[in-house]
Amino acid sequence: MIPERDERRARWVLESIGAHHLGFGDDVPYHASAWDQVERGERPVGDDLAEAFFHLARVEERHGPRDEHGRFRAEWSCLDPLDPPLERLRRSLGVEPPRLDGARFSVALTHDVDSPWRWTRAGLRSAASRLKHNVRGARLGPAVREATGLATVPIHRLRGTDPNWRFEQILREERRRGASGSTFFVLAGHHDPHDGATPEAYTRLRPRLVETLLGADAEVGLHGSYTAATSAQRLAAEKAALEAEAGPVRGQRYHYLRVDPHTNLADLEALGLQYDTTLGFPDAVGFRAGIAHPFRPWSFARDEPLNLLEIPLAAMDATLAEEPYLGLTARRAQPQLMRLLDCAAERGGGFAILWHPDRFDPITSGGWDRLYSRLLEAVRVRGGICMSAAELASSHSTWSK
């Protein structure tokens, strides 16, 4: 006799990989000792289904370490993010992955709008500080880029332009490469220095930003602020503020990837959001929950899945580029992204990629703008399709019923 708890958890895993037709205990064997290990917070050995639950439900994060931003990092995980165990289980059970519109895999193109305008007073001070730091450290390339960027300030002011305000150009390039849409996550509150140094500039520009994005048929999502990750009330207020300008929003991503699957995903469900796409490692490319497709996160408080779709965040420009993480140049980052796409082309996938709008200025981006274009082309060449996060969420919800 299989305990109801184990039956419920196993069925969630099977449904998450599209194996609705398989019987637990019949088609897929049941080993009570493995599920007891999971209950004790241990990674089970010798039972692929129990191990899949361990990863998908993020059991290792329940009492795991957190960094200074409250995030669980890949260096502390027991899984290989580019070898998702649930995709191995799917293949071993003979279950075909979803193929949206006949494509081999699907990518949600997403952008976090952390700083819509670079050349504010604070932005100028930051650029000058970075230039000084790079000169002192003999980092010639970054120093030249900062100096060149600062030299363009008078031209931008004369024209009323800014290197970060490239939203329409980004959308044109995405559509030129075959994408049907993309998503921009917009901040609707600044309560902490991590949210940016110029909240008044962001607040002033947000109506124009929303109008620009909606006018170009982009999706506008909520970018929950740094402290909203620990305050459901603040998150609700930010959602209401953004919807007052943009209309109903369907999904969100927490700023700084401050997601804890055991605490603040339930807040999103309570707000009626359809999807979240925060669950990715800040320090690695790949799949934090061991699955390369959208899924409904598990709630241990209710011992059932949430009524919320999680779109895995598989790659972020900051993860690849920033020194606290991988610290790669655009040229050295390209193989990691191509490996991700090669894996997706082989086994299928439906996941998000994050590229910040401030990496699209050709003068200062260090090649990250060109890498993004190569990434879009690589998806197309490998038989994948690009779309907005809402499109991917809707398509997957239809498939999974």
Image (cartoon, helix red, strand yellow):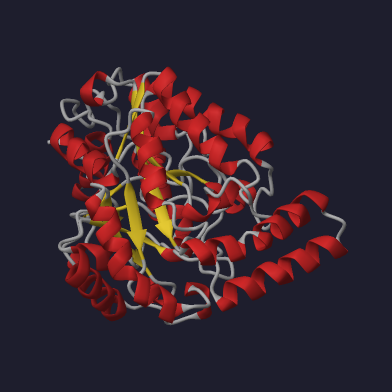
> Furthest residue to the front?
158
Quarter of the image where one finds residue 67: bottom right
Picture coordinates of residue 304 (x, y %)? 21, 54
Picture coordinates of residue 229 (x, y %)? 38, 71
Taking the spot 47% from the left edge, 60% from the top edge, the residue there is 161
Taking the spot 36% from the left edge, 50% from the top edge, the residue there is 57
Q: Establish if 378 lies above or below 61.
A: above
Is residue 211 rendered to the left or right of residue 163? left
Q: Establish if 252 lies above or below 382.
A: below
Taking the spot 40% from the left edge, 73% from the top edge, the residue there is 202
State the count of labels: 0
Taking the spot 46% from the left edge, 60% from the top edge, the residue there is 257
* Quadrant (top left/top right/bottom left/bottom right) for the N terminus: top left
Quarter of the image where one finds residue 273: bottom left
Is residue 317 visible from the viewing direction of this image?
Answer: yes
Is residue 301 visible from the viewing direction of this image?
Answer: no
Is residue 81 rendered to the left or right of residue 291? right
Q: Nearer the viewer, residue 77 or 170?
A: 170
* Quadrant (top left/top right/bottom left/bottom right) for the C terminus: top left
Q: Nearer the viewer, residue 116 or 273?
A: 116
Picture coordinates of residue 125 (x, y %)? 66, 75
Q: Nearer the viewer, residue 76 or 130?
A: 130
Picture coordinates of residue 14 (x, y %)? 25, 34
